[in-house]
Image (cartoon, rainbow, N blue to C red):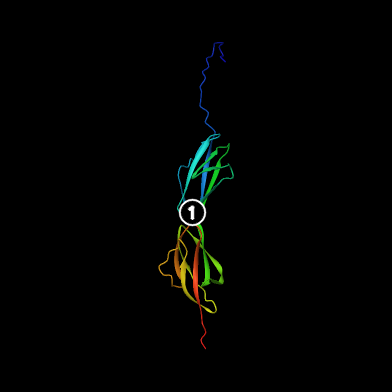
Amino acid sequence: SSTDGGSVTLYAQWAEIPANNHNITYTAQGTGWTYGTTPASAEEGTTVTFVVNPTTGYTVTVTSDDVTLNKNENEYTFTMPTKDVAIKVSATENTHNVIVSYKCGDETIKADATVEAVGEVTTTSVTAPEIDGYAFASWTLGSGIQSANTTANPISITTKASGDYTLTANYNKMVTVY
């Protein structure tokens, strides 16, 4: 208003209202992966895409208590809500089993044992136990098992994390001479 009764001119000034952006945090637990694209914030209602690449020999787990994650290979997407989002990433080394059998010819002389091997390529030591009435002779390596010496006890074997393996400890029956 004017105190002298004159007119007043008003000018409108427009200011852009900032979008409703919210933060995205990524919490890493352990090792076993690398991040690809990881946006730090996004506008609510938009589709957010990020990438987590597992390291060879690991399986990655990606979770969030804030959004539903959709996965396509190593790419994850979600719709940005009206709040900040926390993403948790962890990884575990892949494991596989070596099933050890104990035989004398075709006869099983001791129950099978399972040895867990951890990692993409694993070197594991396995010992054939003493069994009354039998003498350890050699090892028979199942498909995919590598070893330099099949008569060593313990034996050092190398396997890859691509399934379970079988290893057989071969024994000879001890003969008592009178």
Question: How many residues crowd around disc 1 within 10 Å: few (fewer than 14), some, or many (20 or more)?
Answer: many
Q: In this view, does 84 lie above or below 59?
A: above
Observer-nearest of 158 and 134: 134
Observer-nearest of 112 and 69: 112
Q: Residue furthest bottom?
A: 178
Q: Please state, as top left, top right, bottom left or bottom right, where the N terminus lies in the image.
A: top right
Tell me the amino acid under the disc marked 1. Answer: Tyr
Q: Residue furthest front?
A: 106
How many numbered callouts?
Answer: 1
Q: Residue at x 49, y 66 (%)?
A: 167
Q: Which residue lies furthest to the left in this view?
A: 148
Q: Residue at x 50, y 68 (%)?
A: 168
On the image, the x and y values in percent for residue 86 come to 55, 44
On the image, the x and y values in percent for residue 81 come to 57, 37
Q: Residue at x 47, y 55 (%)?
A: 57
Observer-nearest of 23 and 161: 161
Q: Is residue 130 above or below residue 28?
A: below
Observer-nearest of 124 and 21: 124
Quick one: SS at disc 1? strand
Q: Residue at x 52, y 67 (%)?
A: 100
On the image, the x and y values in percent for residue 121 come to 44, 59
On the image, the x and y values in percent for residue 33 come to 47, 50
Residue behind mark 1: 58
